[in-house]
Image (spheres, rainbow, N blue to C red):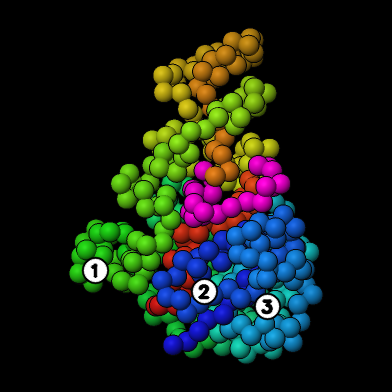
Amino acid sequence: MEYIQVLELFAGLGGLHIAVNNQKDANIQVVKSFEINVNAVKTYQENFGHDVVSNRNILSLSTEELFRQNVNAIFMSPPCQPFTRLGKKLDVNDDRCNAFHHVLKLLPRSPNIQYLLIENVYGFESSKMRDTMLEILQSCGFYTIEFLLSPTDFGVPNSRLRYYLLARKNKKFTFCKHDHTSIVKEFPYCTCRVKSLNDQASICSNCQREVNTNISSLVQQNAGNAAQNSLVNPGKLHSYLDKETDIEQYAVPDKILLRYGNILDLRTFQDSSSCCFTKGYTHLVEGSGSVLVCSRSVTIEEAYKVYNEFKDTDSEAALKSLRKLKIRYFTPKEVERIMCFPDNYTWPKDISDKTKYKLLGNSVNVHVVTLLVALLLHS
Ligand SMILES: C[S@@+](CC[C@H](N)C(=O)[O-])C[C@H]1O[C@@H](n2cnc3c(N)ncnc32)[C@H](O)[C@@H]1O
């Protein structure tokens, strides 16, 4: 049996490490990882031990050192700022691409690397960096397949459309009849969880997609408690919430309510979607993540009718109306669950909520990457 030893680069909180640990077969493990942010490294150590992660700039990694790591796979989420919708889109001209480019340039001299998984933001697929990456991978003899997927595609109530690349040297990807220039926008196998496993059919009667028992059982066993709950209440936010939350501690402040009331992305317990949580959550408003309406007695329509009537003339009356909705931020633990981190994921004691949101906003949806690792290995 082939043993897969993974080097995790730009490791952050280790979302890709969890995806590796989630694999049903024990023939894959993360043996080394690199990350520059001290708080991320401390958190990584808390969860995966002190030996795996090094607090290092990836630009300092040499071919010799890569070889010495004795790895045959690289999984990485390089910085996304050069490609984000809201950024300057400097692409290859942004210095934050340098470390990624550096790793790609090591590949032609690292024949031991057989597998790659790369994650980035929506927008990367149309960048020059992606063209450069594909050129290098093809010259090294990798077969590649690219995806644009969101957790909502898998019943997880959160939008986080992301670009993913899977690459491997010795085995073509045979599961999609796609040409190698188009991007796959639908996971190729059934992920209907229980259903597909009980069916012995090779095509799922629910989604009409092919059943791959490796992937179905992975979904069933390892999707995390929250995603398991969604079997009972498909994709509702309430399955991902803390049992008790101090609404005051996480309340959206009055000045935000008053000034930005109309651009808050409001969700209720019964909603089956939420906005992508970004690293700016709780200190930026627009597009940084959803907030939760906790009141069950006042409707959003009623409260906003009064707010919009008075916001320019009587701020106290406008505020009073929105306060009745008891609008709060999702707690870091809730964001973690929505991103399908396991319930036993822990944080060092001195990491603030603000830092947790920042690191989570940079991280990956563990459920989606768990399935992609399975595809890389089993398809
Ligand atoms: C998109 S995040 C990765 C998220 C990660 N997959 C996770 O699960 O949290 C990119 C990470 O790369 C780190 N980083 C950026 N430039 C780096 C460099 N030159 N060397 C090492 N780490 C770097 C950042 O600190 C950040 O944590």
Tell me the chief SS of the magenta region.
loop
**Distance between the alpha carbons at the discs numbered 3 and 1:** 38 Å
Does dot 3 land on a helix, a strand or a loop? Answer: helix
Residue tagged 2: 166
> Looking at the rendered structure, which numbered label has been put on residue 104?
3
At x 60% / y 16%, what residue is drawn? 319
- Circles 1 and 2: CB distance less than 8 Å? no
At x 58% / y 83%, what residue is drawn? 72
Identify which amino acid the numbered label 1 is placed on.
Answer: Ile
332 over 345 or under it: above or below: above
Give the left or right position of residue 13, taking residue 151 as reference. right
Residue tagged 1: 203
- Circles 2 and 3: CB distance less than 8 Å? no
367 over 68 or under it: above or below: above
Give the left or right position of residue 242, taking residue 205 as reference. right
The spot of residue 198 in percent (x, y) is: 22, 63
